[in-house]
Image (cartoon, rainbow, N blue to C red):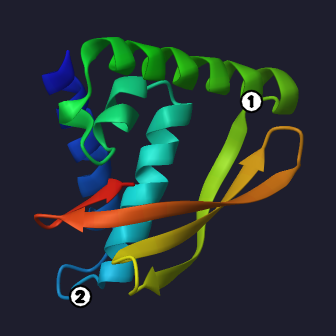
Amino acid sequence: MMRTTFWLLTLLLLTACGSKSSDVELTAEEMAAEAAMNNYKALYRGYYEAFLDSRLHADEMPESYREAMLTNLKQHVRQVESCHHGVKDIEISHTQMDTTLHMMQVFLLVSYGDTTKEEIVVPMVEIDGEWKLK
């Protein structure tokens, strides 16, 4: 199951990066923003394990904590569906490098089904060339 989830998330990331010209190299800000947006889109499409696996140190979580996190993610998505009629779209607003904490702050604009919008801040860190949710 985790392998399938990993490949699904990889496919999402490749699809997003594939939309750019192959001659243009993405900046750190663009890579972090794309990763954050794709992870949140995966969450609201029901890929809870993929979202959880995209977190920093996800592989070190005890199984009981992992199960509790998955339950919380599912409850959150159900609550968003109930209160806001789901998520209509997620867009990158902007990014800001935090040199003190060595991470990228990605600002995402979440558009809900009830026409409300919310800007969320997603802290991202780069580990071995891969951007992870902090």
Name the amino acid, label 1: Val
Across and down, in percent, residue 122 comes to 52, 60
Please name the residue that numbered disc 2 is placed on: 24
Q: Residue at x 24, y 55 (%)?
A: 14
| SS for callout 1 | helix
* 82 vs 60, nearest the viewer: 60
- From the viewer's perspective, is residue 46 above or below residue 15? above
Q: Residue at x 86, y 27 (%)?
A: 83
Name the amino acid, label 2: Val
* 22 vs 70, nearest the viewer: 70
Across and down, in percent, residue 89 comes to 66, 49
- Left or right: 120, with 26 as reference point: right
Q: Which residue is drawn at 32% across and 71% down?
A: 31
Quadrant assignment for the N terminus: top left
The 10 Å Cα crowd at callout 1, few under 14, some 14 to 19, many 20 or more, is some
Please name the residue that numbered disc 1 is placed on: 80
Across and down, in percent, residue 44 comes to 56, 33
* 30 vs 106, nearest the viewer: 106
Q: How far apart are marks 2 and 1 (CA)?
A: 37 Å
Of discs 2 and 1, which sits in the foreground?
Answer: 1
Across and down, in percent, residue 47 comes to 41, 27
- Left or right: 59, with 81 as reference point: left
**Disc with the residue nearer the chain's start (2 vs 1):** 2
Quadrant assignment for the C terminus: bottom left
